[in-house]
Amino acid sequence: MSGKRQKNQPEQLGLALNPERRSEAPKAGGQGTEPLTAKRAHESPADTERLMEEVCERQNCQRALKRVKANKGSPGIDGMTVKELPGYLKQHWPAIREQLLSGTYRPDPVKRVEIDKPDGGVRKLGVPTVLDRFIQQAVLQVLQRRWDRTFCDHSYGFRPGRSAHQAVARAQQYVCEGFRWVVDLDLEKFFDRVCHDKLMARVAQRISDRRLLKLIRAFLTAGVMESGLVSAVDEGAPQGGPLSPLLSNLVLDELDRELERRGHRFVRYADDSNVYVRSERAGQRVMASLTAFITQRLKLKVNDEKSAVARPVDRKFLGFSFTNHTQSKRRIAPKAIVRFKERVRELTSRTRGVSLARMVEELSTYLRGWRSYFGFCQTPSVLHELDRWLRRRLRAALWKQWKHGRGRFTELRKRGVSLQLAAKTAGSAHGPWHLANSPALAIALPNAFFDSLGLPRLVVTEQLNPPNRRMRTRMSGGVAGARG
């Protein structure tokens, strides 16, 4: 990686390069500082006027580098990888630090990346360079420990010590308390519509370090490179950088405070907001008033097609919904189950041409992550059913790999299936999916077989008879066990 890293600037067709390099001596810059006339909240100016020194402090930077390396991620527009970052910093950090402290550091444009949304459409991400991700992470660590304690208690997204599971449990609590209608608010292209001036005004209320204010605005306005062209941006906080979630929480904290002021029961995770009320009529009133507040005050837009006033059983929140019982239980949302099955079908396709061991290895990685999140549901019967469906998929795949009748007969006999049953099953005209549910394959490929391959179960069966504890039965003595 060259030590003289050039800066991309939108000029003519956006392909011209600025000859200024980060490793050169920093130049003074007085433009782009934020107006400091707004009243600052939560901290005095004296407490926040030298935050850039905290950002550049050695221990803070070491933590930031460790986090960026752990998060991995793809390179930005300059092609530098995470593995190359430590060596680059070792050589160029003094010059970069001087630029940060003098307020002249200029981030690169982000790289446009599009990923498919689960419900259709695409989500546009902006991937910063690894160097910019490192600096954003260092800024995040300084600001988050100051700001997080000031955010609303009903906000759970991208906050230390808080999780999606806690948000779902809070929503469930409201439903159990009798608030059985939900105002489900979906903000349309939230990260693309954040007003820079409004956001920076809120930032300036909290910090007074002009260098840091200038740096944050520079990250917001760095531009986007797509198909080799750099486009300027005048709104939005691109998803993909470490700083974006904190800034989004700052923007939506105003919505949280308004909901608190009105006395609503609500939960917010990032840009997913649910307000719980007692009746449909109350829900419609809340929806109308909040839509006006979001549009006029926050300068954002509510997605009318995806927002609704409905029963919680009919809506999903962070992949979960709730049963319609008096003591409502968490269940996996139907769409999440559909996506699970789609992914499993991809991994267990009978035309993939991979061994069963390889298939199970790939499945295991996905299943452990899925189980760690959706295992939070309170409907284990659904997980048991998915377990059975998954093992049936694997039996069908292996049956297909055995190919012909003679080979299938041999495999069945080798696995303990009786002569008559093996011959009947191997000669059957039924397809793999039907035979995967047959008695012969249940004998040949029992659940213990998949356990031995390392396939995780979605439901971990509790030990029925713990050690050092006698089994009680209705029979006395003999082989049934001792009483007492």
Image (cartoon, helix red, strand yellow):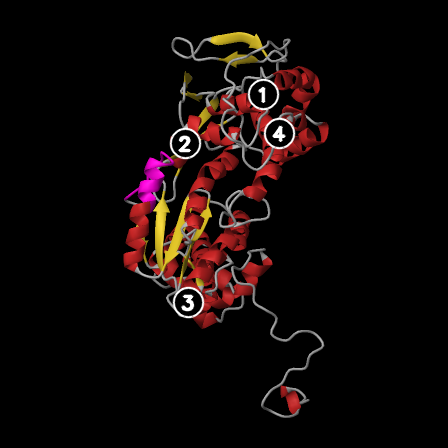
Give the camera-side residue of 216 and 340: 216
Query: SS of the residue at dot 1?
Result: helix
Q: Is residue 148 left or right of residue 386?
A: right
Between the residue at mark 4 and the residue at mark 2, the CA separation in whole angstroms equals 24 Å
User: Which part of the image, by quadrant, shows the N terminus?
Assistant: top right
Between the residue at mark 4 and the residue at mark 3, the CA separation in whole angstroms equals 70 Å
Between the residue at mark 3 and the residue at mark 2, the CA separation in whole angstroms equals 57 Å
Q: Which of the two marks, 4 or 2, is nearer to us in this view?
A: 4
Give the camera-side residue of 346 and 299: 299
Return the x and y of residue 371 as percentages of the image width and height: 52, 55
Q: Which residue is mark 3?
A: 438
Q: Which residues are magenta?
A: 290-304
Q: Which of the two marks, 3 or 2, is nearer to us in this view?
A: 2
Query: SS of the residue at dot 4?
Result: helix
Q: Given the image, on which type of amino acid does mark 2 rest? A: Val
Q: Which of the two marks, 4 or 3, is nearer to us in this view?
A: 4
Q: Which residue is mark 1?
A: 211
First in sequence: mark 2 vs mark 1 = 2
Q: Which residue is mark 4?
A: 48
